[in-house]
Image (cartoon, helix red, strand yellow):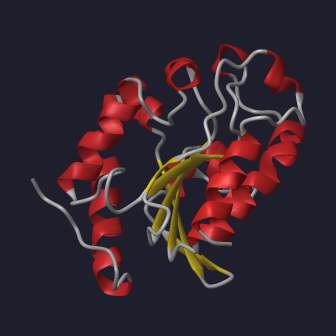
Amino acid sequence: MNESEFRALEQSCKTCRACGLCKTRHNVVFGIGNPAAEVLFIGEGPGENEDLQGEPFVGRGGKLLDTMLEAVGLSRKHNIYIANMVKCRPPQNRDPFPEEQDACAHWLADQIAYIHPKIIVCLGRVAAFRMISPDFKVTKQHGQFFEKNGILYMGMFHPAAILRNPNQKPEAFADFLKLRDKIEEICDKTTLVFD
């Protein structure tokens, strides 16, 4: 898949009607960032702000995520890509149902195939359950790396969970430092950017 095919994939995704989430969405939230990134972040699904703006992680949780990313030299504008398990907002920000995740899985699989990341970071338990293991325990296993099919996976606390429980912030930031160290170890095309 080349860059124009990736853009065509995005346009095709924006017309998807494979599950009921299409009936209540304002925007399909395909993803944002550098499609040549070696690090891919995956959340569970768009929230209200994301649905309205068509971009992942733009509310309070997104601001916290950007702050933590910037502290370790990462940026959605330069050296990472951010996507979600499902591309349309589940009503009332509920967890996406398994059948909704299944209906959307091919979009994410195509994104992963194109981006070809060395590291995938799962933000929150829903993404970690789906991408790492159905018995993943975010509170116990966050910040650990798991190798699957030549890709390193790491589960982290979801930014919204950190906002609800600020006591998790030091642990969450420690995970970003581990991620930075792993990037410096294995990602030869990722330049960390500090303003």
Quadrant housing residue 182: bottom left
Is 24 rendered above or below residue 130? above
Residue 103 pos. (x, y %): 87, 44
Q: Is residue 133 rendered to the left or right of residue 78?
A: right
Camera sees residue 129: no
Quadrant assignment for the N terminus:
bottom right
Q: Is residue 79 rendered to the left or right of residue 19?
A: left
Q: Is residue 44 rendered to the left or right of residue 38?
A: right
Q: Is residue 9 rendered to the left or right of residue 153?
A: right
At a point 66% along the width and 48% down the height, the residue shown is: 10
Quadrant housing residue 58: top left
Residue 54 pos. (x, y %): 55, 29
At a point 87% along the width and 32% down the height, the residue shown is: 17
Judged from this view, the residue extending furthest toward the front is: 4
Is 11 rendered above or below residue 195? above
Residue 135 pos. (x, y %): 72, 56
At a point 62% along the width and 85% down the height, the residue shown is: 150
Judged from this view, the residue extending furthest toward the left is: 195
Is 175 rendered above or below residue 169? below
Is 12 rendered above or below residue 165? below
Quadrant housing residue 130: bottom right
Residue 191 pos. (x, y %): 25, 73
Q: Judge by depth and name the residue closer to the eye, 137 or 190.
A: 190
Q: How many marks?
A: 0
Q: Judge by depth and name the residue closer to the eye, 127 or 20.
A: 20
At a point 58% along the width and 78% down the height, the residue shown is: 151
Camera sees residue 42: yes
